Image (cartoon, grey):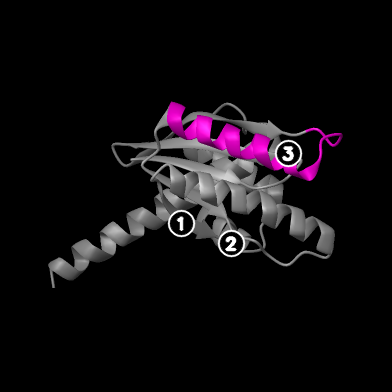
Amino acid sequence: MRIIGIDPGTATTGWAVVEEVKKNPRLIACGCINTSKFNSDAERLVEIGRDIGSLIKKYKPDEAAIEDLFFFKNLKTAITVAQARGVILYEIKKNGVSLSNYTPLQVKQALTGYGRAEKKQIQIMVKNILKLRSAPKPDDAADAVAIAICHLNSRMRERINRESERTR
């Protein structure tokens, strides 16, 4: 099972490809799509869409996991992130990849068991779960890895529930 995790943003979109190997997650690749603040919003969205499409073609994920929008104090930021997220959702579906959405709270709970965990705690758990020497950098890439791991955990829970229902 290969998952692409995405942390949407207009200036920076984090992405990660995580694969399940013998029921253990393994990081294949991660990084960020960085757009120039000197480009128009439309140009930035085209770049994000093009790059997400390229990542899907290169890594051939079975499924995608993306961070859901949550409450923003800054309405302008919320709108631009929503626009970027829309382009990403379009590319995922255009390429025939199934999609799941996770809130920041769900991601934090899946990795640490605590929905209000700090970013540093998430990074430590990503590093430990994947048995890495250090947490992925930059933060947006690490967040995308966490989203992918959250999705794998969710899939594992679904399998366990199906198996326990069959044995009843």
The amino acid beneath tag 2 is Thr
When asked about the image quadrant of residue 140, the answer is top right
Question: Is 87 located above or below residue 78 in the figure?
Answer: above
**Residue 132 place in picture, x, y as percent:** 53, 29
Q: Nearer the viewer, residue 19 or 32?
A: 32
The kind of secondary structure element at disc 1 is strand
Q: Is residue 131 visible?
A: no
Query: Label 2 neighbourhood size at 10 Å, few (<14), some (14-19), many (20+)?
Result: some
Position of 83 relative to 19 (above/below): below
The residue depicted at 59 percent of the width and 57 percent of the height is 108
Q: Which residue is drawn at 27% across and 57% down?
A: 159
Counting residues from the start of the chain, the first of labels 1 and 3 encountered is 3
Q: Nearer the viewer, residue 34 or 18?
A: 34
Q: Which residue is drawn at 57% across and 26% down?
A: 133
Alpha carbon separation for disc pair 2 and 1:
10 Å
Residue neighbourhood size for the residue with mark 1, other residues' Cα within 10 Å, grouped as few (<14), some (14–19), many (≥20)? some
Magenta: main secondary structure: helix
Q: Does the magenta stretch include residue 50?
A: yes
Residue in the foreground of this view, choosing between 100 and 148? 100
Magenta residues span: 36-58
Disc nearest the viewer among 1 and 3: 3
Q: Is mark 2 on a helix, strand or loop?
A: loop
Residue at the spot of label 1:
100
Which residue is at a point 51% across and 44% down the rendered structure image? 91
Q: Residue 44 carries which label?
A: 3
Residue type for callout 3: Arg
The quadrant in which the C terminus is found is: bottom left
